[in-house]
Amino acid sequence: MIAIARLQAPIVLAHGLFGFSRIGLGRLTLTSYFRGIPELLRGAGNRVLVTRVHPIAGVEFRARRLGDRILGALGEEPVHIIGHSMGGLDARWLLAEAGWRKRVLSLTTIGTPHLGTSLADFAKLRVGRVYRLLESLGIDPRGLLDITRRSARRLHRRLGQIDDLPCFSVAGDPPWEEVTWPLQRLYTVLGELEGSNDGLVPVTSARAFGTPLTSWPADHLRQMNWLVPARANSCCPPIPWLYAGLIAHLASLGFAASEPALPLLPGTASALAAGVGSGQEREELAGESGEASRLEVDLARSPVSADKSLPREC
């Protein structure tokens, strides 16, 4: 039986650049940004809000929309925010706004370019005309500029560190054989420029905020539970387990609900990790009472150590 920690307050998942909440037809979800993660956490009794903001606007605009989404769905209730990629920058800006510092209980960023990325610098040089074209069409591309090293470091100094609430950062630091094919070339180039990275964001940039937690051997796409590895000997744990570890870490800090977590049916987490789709497939999964999974893991006890990294060699 697999158990996942249950938090008293809602969990807000904030997406990154080019992000979305879901793609689907009516009630049928074809895919989502945090693929399978909200369902897993909700299955344990957590309340989860997946927000949606402008995909390429600047941090300031996206942060205000993030605040609007949270207020619209949860009112004044305190929340935990987990931001992937630029979603972490949005959350940091939000915390600088009046009143939000008291409403947010914790912030965890995953693969967030706190100090920017050389790839954004390169993109600005090569396709700056495209940015200007987008502006002429009334499309705000500021987000693409906010993650250049110069802009991101200026923002990092402006926002500063946050000392009055728990803040954590997670970097992606996979070995090359664990990098998904769309990011392999970028991973190699960025490695030559800035060292260890997740294919888009350097490790040093992702770990520059809050208390760094154990790095994930997962690239930037896999951090969203996309392109799940097919090989059995992958050194990357199932991504839902890693998110569950973050929730367990917050629970260990005193944020756990007074009611016990709801155990998941055997095989549910591993099936989500393996890419079981949403909608009907998950309903069928939830109704299964057959074989128990061979993997019996208590995710509420999964260690999430500060300032450590998993080995990059599998």
Image: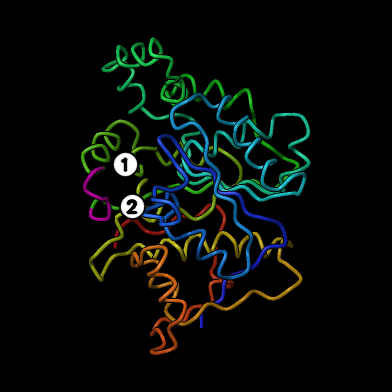
Q: Picture coordinates of residue 63 (x, y %)?
A: 60, 31
Left or right, 84 with respect to 131, comes to right
**Are discs 2 and 1 less than 8 Å apart at CB?**
yes
Q: Amino acid at mark 2?
A: Pro
For the point 41% across and 76% down, the residue is 285
Which is more N-terminal, label 1 or label 2? Answer: 2
Q: Picture coordinates of residue 201 (x, y %)?
A: 39, 38
For the point 30% across and 30% down, the residue is 193
Near mark 1 (Cα within 10 A), the count class, few <14, some 14-19 or many ≥20, is many
Q: How is the image coloured?
A: rainbow
Q: Picture coordinates of residue 31 (x, y %)?
A: 37, 53
Which residue is tagged 2?
A: 174
For the point 21% across and 39% down, the residue is 185
Q: Kindly identify which numbered label has been placed on residue 261.
A: none
Q: Kindly identify which numbered label has been placed on residue 199.
A: 1
Q: What whole-number distance in Å separates the C-alpha atoms at marks 2 and 1?
A: 9 Å
Q: Main secondary structure of the magenta part?
A: helix
Left or right, 311 with respect to 114, comes to left
Q: Is residue 194 above or below residue 230?
A: above
Total labels: the figure holds 2
Q: Picture coordinates of residue 75 (x, y %)?
A: 74, 44
Q: Secondary structure at mark 1?
A: loop
Left or right, 132 with respect to 184, comes to right
Q: Amino acid at mark 1?
A: Gly
Near mark 2 (Cα within 10 A), the count class, few <14, some 14-19 or many ≥20, is many
Over which residues does the magenta segment extend? 177-182
Residue 62, magenta (yes or no): no
284, 182: nearer the viewer: 284
Q: Is residue 294 above or below residue 67?
A: below
Left or right, 256 with respect to 296, comes to right
